[in-house]
Image (cartoon, rainbow, N blue to C red):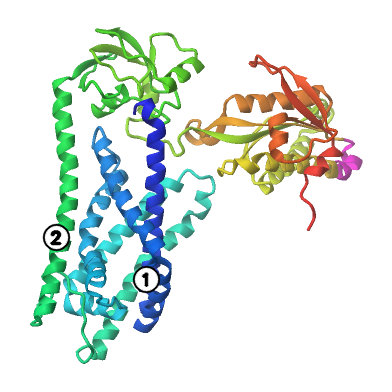
Amino acid sequence: MNSDNLPASLQLQKLRLLSGLIMFSFLSMHLLNHALGLISIEAAEHGKRWFSAVWMNPVSLSAFYGAVLTHVLLVLHALYKRRTLNMPMREALQLIFGLLIPLLIIEHAASLRFSSMLYSIPITYENVIRRLWINAPVAGVRQSVAVVVIWSHGCIGLFFWLRYRSWYPRVAPYFLTIAVLVPVMALLGFSSAGRELESAQSYRALPNPIIAAPNELHRPDPRQASIDDNINNIVKSIQLTFVGMVGTVFLLRGARTLRQNSTSIDIHYEHGATVRAPKDMTLLEASRLNGISHYSVCGGRGRCSTCRVRILESDAPLPPPGDIERATLQRIHADQNIRLGCQLRPQSNLRVALLLSQNHQQVAPAESEPIRPGREEEIAVLFCDLRNFTTLTEARLPYDIVFLLNRYFAIVGQAIEQSGGRLDKFIGDGAMALFGLDGNSANACRDAMRAAATIVQDIERLNEELEKDFSVHLRIAIGVHTGPSIVGVMGYGEAKSLTAIGDTVNVASRLESVAKELNATIVVSEPAIVQSGVPIGTLQKHDITVRGRSSQMRVYVISEQESARFLPTPA
């Protein structure tokens, strides 16, 4: 993906997500309405009145139809933009379901809507059930399949959106239960209503303004036959339009492939492989299209440097780096012959070396994705450590030390979790915690300061409890800082875990050391104290030098007594 198009691409992703959420909300209420058929047709009809009140007003209808049109166009746009149709199975299912849905649903939805709009034929739940269950059971089976396909498509989309949220594993079982129950109850409600209508045998005596579907009903009434033909023509026109749009996308893809093949270049890899690729394709795309294991943690967005390559030879000058690539290369102090594979679009034959060991490539094949790929997030980081713990351990039994440490670890862990943070790791007698991983960066600093104050308070209580028996007085040093960090699952084998790295983490660790140097309890950076929302007042401040930074940083020192202001007010 070209770096210049990155912001526009992100906006399109957000628009696609928003349109999908609107349609999923409509579908959820529609299926729940069908589930009321388990009670009775009358109950389903009553539920339909609530459904119509929410969705059949001009504002909601405009939003829904706009979402449908937007989502379809964005799906076709994404299909065209894909350089290769090689993709993981779940992505392939999502794409196939997305293309099938309009073909499955157009006939039913358009028949109902245009019958109502053009001919004022009422859309009642009883009429719809009679049509799909009694008059045209084949259409009923088709709509039942459509329900499963559409609901599955929506659930897969929600999974892709939510799977990396820190809270998702906790609620995933409940979401799965809902995902299974809603369509099952809707189909059972449809079946129950159909059997109720069929067993009553009253439908023959009732007025029969049935909304006809193409080729399903043949009436002697000339006016009704004319209505059926008109609706049939409209439905066929919409279906052909959609099929034409999909066909046009594939024709454009084919034309692009022919054009690219006529201007292809050779890419030679240091390990011996050679591939041909179009000129306007990135090096990373060319590698993956031809089965070359080319690693990229960020998914080819220029947010990491794991796809970087060394340019060994080139028949012509390479395109200059874009803004995103240039910033990333400067950040890692790359040599002039180092480029990012996801951003470089070579225009001539070249020879490159992948700067990733073969072992790592084998661990992460071309199409694999980490459980949570590394990405930059705005978080708050807390480091805490015991003072002079080595001295405390010199004259005590190992079992006593283990007991003290476990009590200390329990205090730290509970304070962090109760404040909404994530305990990242224990480092000796120290600990690292992350706040704001749920995406709520606005409260991250406030939560971190509350955790720090709780740790200080609980350590003091532990001292009162243990001072008589152990003759110890534990003292804590805490550092808190906020800023952008790379958050992702890192490690190897069983040692993999969600963690954060970057300058923000390094500074927070340094502030914990500053707390020891200043004989203070808590040292917090100015950005963190400001974002916490607590008045600075008379807090002691210092300007310190942090290793790796050219300018000084202002920090605030908080004593044990002053930390109490960060504790939640008792109810």
Q: Which residue is mark 1?
A: 185
Please identify, in this view, whether the residue under mark 1 or under mark 2 is nearer the observer: 2
Q: Which secondary structure type mostly characterizes the magenta part of the structure?
A: helix
Q: Residues within 10 Å of mark 1 (few under 14, many from 20)?
A: some
* Residue 13 seen in the figure: yes
**In what quadrant of the picture does the C terminus appear?**
bottom right
Dot 1 amino acid type: Met
- In this view, 262 is above or below 60: above
Q: Residue at x 16, y 51 (%)?
A: 243
In this view, the residue in front, 140 or 386, is: 140
Residue 204 image offset from top left, x and y in percent: 19, 89
In this view, the residue in front, 259 or 358, is: 259
Residue 99 image offset from top left, x and y in percent: 23, 51
**In what quadrant of the picture does the N terminus appear?**
top left
Tell me which segment is drawn in magenta. 463-472
Q: Residues within 10 Å of mark 2 (few under 14, many from 20)?
A: some
- In this view, 523 is above or below 327: below
Q: Residue at x 35, y 68 (%)?
A: 184
Residue 520 image offset from top left, x and y in percent: 83, 29
Number of disc labels: 2
Asked whether, in this view, residue 174 is left or right of residue 202, the answer is right
Q: Which residue is mark 2?
A: 236
Disc 1 or 2, which lies upstream in sequence? 1
Dot 2 amino acid type: Lys
Tell whether position 298 is magenta: no
